Amino acid sequence: MVFRFALVVVCLGGWCALPARSQVRPESTQALPAQQQFEYTRTLWRISDGLPEDTVQAIVESSEGVLWIGTTGGLTRFDGSHMEVTARAQPLLANSIFTLTFGRDGSLWAGTEGGGLLRLRNGVVKAYSSSEGLTDGFVRKVFEDSRGRLWVGTDDGLFVMDAASTGERLRRVDVGAIAPQAVHSITEDKTGRIWVGGSRLIALDPDGTEREFALPGAYSQNRVKSVLETRDGRLWVGTVGGLQYLEKGKFHTVAGIRATVRTLLESSDGTLWIGTIGNGVWTLRPGSSDTLRRISGQGLLPSETVLYLFEDDQRQIWIGTQAGLVRLNKTPVRVVALPESGDPDFGTISGDEHGDVWVAAQNLYLIRKNVARRVTYGGLTNIKVRNVYRARDGALWIGTDGSGAYRVDGDEVRHYTAPAELTNNFIRGFLESRDGAMWIATDEGVSRIGAEGAKKFTEANGLAFFSTRSLLQDSGGSLWIGTDHGLSRWKNGRFEQDAATVALAQDQVWSILEDRSGALWFGTRDHGLFRYRAGPGAGKGSLQQFTASEGLPSNSVYQVLQDRTGRFWVTGPNTIASVAETEMERASSAAQPLSVQTYRMPFGADGAQMYGGRQPAGYLAPDDSVWFPTSRGAAHLARVETAAEPAPRASVDGVIEDGQSVAPNGPLKVAANVVRLSFAFTVVSLRPQDGVRFRYKLEGFDPSWNTAGVNREATYTNLRAGSYRFRVRAFNTANPESVSEFDLVLVKAQVFYETWWFYALCGVIVLAVAWSLYQVRVRGMRTRFAAVLEERSRLAREMHDTVIQGCAGISALLEAMASTQELKAGSEQVATKDGLLEVARVQARTTIDEARQAIWNMRHEPEKDVDLIAALKGVAAQTTRESEAGESRTVVAFEHDVERMAVGASVAHEILMTVREAVYNSVQHSRSGRVELQLKMRGEELVISIADKGCGFATDRENVVAEGHYGIVGMRERVQRLGGRMELTSARGVGTRVQLRLRVRGDSR
């Protein structure tokens, strides 16, 4: 529908035209108005951050870039990361440090309240008091002039130390012609004149002449607290009543400051900083149109009582107050506050060729000359504005939060709503395509408003996802639509797929940009930035990802812009960053992180959250400045050239061994029992360290460099003994090519099981064990071989003593039968043959039984006891019977002194086989008619003897074996198996005697 009405612009608040000034006058005596932007970021330190006390009275910087801070509670060393209270190891008369300065020789001079003058050099504190000529212990100022003289101002007198004339003694100056006074400030001007301020203002010429200067106003208001000469030659004097300056021989009062000026500072840009008691900090730019401005208020300082001002080598302003230490850093970001904006949950920003900036944050605001005013259109009341878009025909399109879209052209307004023209009434972005159609992104799809009418696109029409976030038409005519779940490409009247849409199918695409080279950039909510270069053919092209790992401040990208110089501007949830175009190209083929410049929000807007997800979330103005919507207003960043920052100096400030801190002094010796080793590293830099990054490597362990996390610590566990070198590198994301490095050598001791002698001992033990195992194996083999031999010997004995002897006996009987057949005849021959045949049959049966018994014994069945006496009687009787049947006719007589002896069957078998062998040998070979077999007990020893008085034989072993007397060998082996011994005595023609001595366990009676 179309409405016609008068366009009415209602501005809340008036334009503020500031007149030019030709003299110093106040701009405001109140806090900064909402439209006036603060240009510094602020950082605050208090007791909770390491200060001994909150009251900071003096600040000085060493040549190493470290701050020394004097407080009412002591002296503190600050390296930008850690505060360390010093000068307490040696008791002092007073801890309150009032003034500080560094001498040419590197000595730190400190004036105390009640404790005199202190000098800190090489860690040693020396106190100067009355014995060194300092008669007052309340030192208010210490100053070293161009001639190397040390001037000391106290509550009661001015003193000087001239090493060339008085050594380390102090000489009082305000005596005689120079009236004594309380001194609070000392400085030297360009002519070498020493200015001394206190109860009076005096100047001491190089020749020693004193001149006193009278200050205008009441005496009580003219007590001097600070004196400073600026570059333009003006001498500024801070007094109890305000600020005055000397020009053309006359002092002038600066209007607007009516508080005690405790401290003065001229910064590197020529600004005069003025610290007051109770009225905060003021700045003044000396010149033809001096501008005095109070920059404190609105909570900038923790206390409006400013005790000291200091600028370090990095051009940072440090402010010592009664309630803490403040650091101010200049930032190019200005934030234009939005009147009556409340706390909206969205914001978009856009502009036109006239330089006007439009901000939609529920209400609609117009920014001109960095001043924001709320704008309303008649008839468009009570609507929440989400975004504004200026079409090529000059019409203004306004997107709302639930009320659809409006097109305002002069006094004509047309309203577009769902479901008639739009897919949804919550507008997220506008885009005018080359054919003049207006594409409108909403919470639930995209609408196209053209000459032919409205057309709606949802997932049913091929859209990647219903929740749309960004729109862009590239130089080739393709329309790109970023959604919360993928990317869509509209070309030739339909949705098409390519490498980009496939790769980003799961991503939330919140921003789309085509750079001046034709490459497309896609900013995603969670996975960083993607660059897409389309290639020939459908679906072709290369996609490269940039994340925090490559140097981006965040993986959440809300907006991507490119200015006319090629620099990319990227915002995230709480960051604004820029990257040179050449850096993005270099990063395509280099492993080095991107050089990313981040910008901090000024005080008053610190903690501001950036807005994204609704377009446009950033605006590139015609003057190449950039604008971004934030929760604190519109952030404006003018094009600035920032000097490359030097690399922050890396340092290892702590080593922790199993929870115990040790000094990080190399070479570090680590005990062998240490399991967990941690290195805490930092940088010595007084600048904000948000952009500082670290990489570390433990040489001897890490194969490559590691990227440090936010805790700035590297931990290693169970390191082996040996030498290592811990290396840490620090760089700033704005200049990653500039790197500083710190290394620490450490040696971990060996535990006993890692020493060479332990390894040697282990080697010896292994060899010994191997040798022992080898010996055991050889011994086992020998034992098994011996067992085999023993078994063979036993079998040979059994065969000899049973089968062979039985066969021999049978053979003898058969020969006897043959002899009888030749010699005898008749019935006597028959009787003899029958007798011999019976004996042979018995002998054969006995031999078979003995062989069976030998085989049975080999099965190791449980044996029974045998009566040895009865068995021996049987041997004697059988042998006698066999002998009588043959030709030898030998009698075997058996004598014994016990009636019964029960022994095990196996033992009895061995004894019987041995005795039988001996008896048979005597019967067969002795040619003696009688063999005596005796068994006697000698205590626990059994003695069995077999004796004859036959022919005898040689008993040496060689002869026995040579003559084939293996029976004797078997006899000896059997006795030895029973643990006894056999004694053989024989002589030719005398006879033979075999004696067996055994210890046999058995029942004998």
Image (cartoon, grey):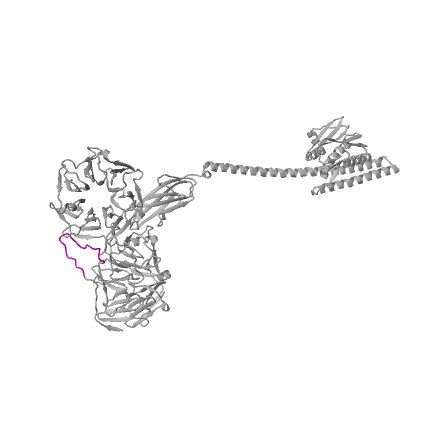
Residue at x-position 31% and y-position 38%: 89
**Residue 16 falls within the magenta-colored stretch:** yes
Quadrant in the rendering for residue 636: bottom left
In the depicted structure, whether residue 759 falls above or below residue 232: above
Left or right, 8 with reference to 665: left
In the depicted structure, whether residue 345 falls above or below residue 914: below
In the depicted structure, whether residue 600 falls above or below residue 908: below
Which quarter of the figure is the N terminus placed in? Answer: bottom left
Residue 74 point in image, percent of width and height: 28, 42
Quadrant in the rendering for residue 854: top right
Q: Mark yes or no: residue 964 visible.
A: no
Q: Residue furthest right?
A: 826
Left or right, 580 with reference to 892: left
Residue 278 point in image, percent of width and height: 22, 50
Q: Mark yes or no: residue 717 visible.
A: yes
Residue 684 point in image, percent of width and height: 30, 45
Near-viewer residue (211 or 349): 211
**Residue 405 falls within the magenta-colored stretch:** no
Residue at x-position 19% and y-position 62%: 14
Left or right, 515 with reference to 869: left
Residue at x-position 76% and y-position 41%: 849
Count the labels in the image.
Answer: 0
Which quarter of the figure is the C terminus placed in? Answer: top right
Left or right, 615 with reference to 881: left
Magenta residues (range):
15-34
Residue 87 point in image, percent of width and height: 29, 39
